[in-house]
Image: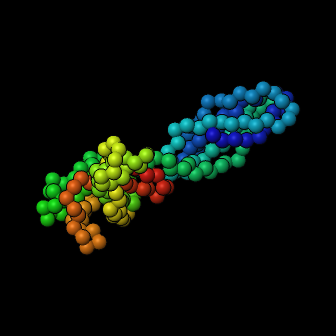
Amino acid sequence: VVRAQLMTGGLATSVVADVGATTAYGATTSPVNLAGNVMSVAVAVPIAGLTGGTTVHVRLRATNAKGEAASADLTVAVPDRTAPTLTKLRLSSNPIFSGATPRVRSTLGERSTVRLRIQRRVAGRTKGTTCVPGRATGARCVKLVGITTINAGVLRAGAVAVRVPARIRGARLARGSYLLTLSATDAAGNVAT
């Protein structure tokens, strides 16, 4: 949305925004129609379809019975609000406890910082609203206990593989059930898991 204050000269006025990658613009929004008013009138012109992480040029044009007036060219940075993509997520077929080095593999949609969080699933019983590992009384539950987070670094788009270590802080991973969560954070701070 581009916002501006206009003097309509007391006449009904139509306002559009010209938008594009250069000052040649190339696209024009649908008009926003304003009733005539001798005072300053606030106008908001919606702009859709912009690609995040780009810079666009915008010019407002107002037309009424007295003619047309255009604003100066504005450059607008369009924020990147699109999370990176992680697709084709899979764990290599080697079991973690066989001594082999398994990897979490995925396809990354854009350059991102990649992390692998490892949590162990521990059986427990509920105590109030909390899941307590061990033999407490209450309904059965599963508590996720954080083991570690592996920072794989900044990786480029394409196939990625993050090694799942058999040892963490010198200790071998205990047999059991684990939750592995792969996440990607792009330069704009958007996160995908």
Where is residue 11? Give x, y as percent. 82, 27
Front residue of 43 and 98: 98
Where is residue 98? Give x, y as percent. 12, 61
Is the residue 165 above or below the residue 105 in the image? below
Q: Quadrant of residue 48?
A: top right
If the image is split into quadrants, where does the N terminus sit? top right
67 relative to 173 in the view: left or right: right
Is the residue 169 above or below the residue 159 in the image? below
Front residue of 43 and 72: 43
Determine the residue positioned at 81% across, 27% down: 36
162 relative to 73 in the view: left or right: left
Determine the residue positioned at 61% across, 30% down: 30
Front residue of 48 and 19: 48
Observer able to see residue 181: no
The extreme bottom residue here reads 170
Determine the residue positioned at 30% across, 52% down: 135
Is the residue 57 above or below the residue 166 in the image? above
Front residue of 83 and 46: 83
The extreme right residue here reads 38
82 relative to 21 in the view: left or right: left
Q: Quadrant of residue 120?
A: bottom left
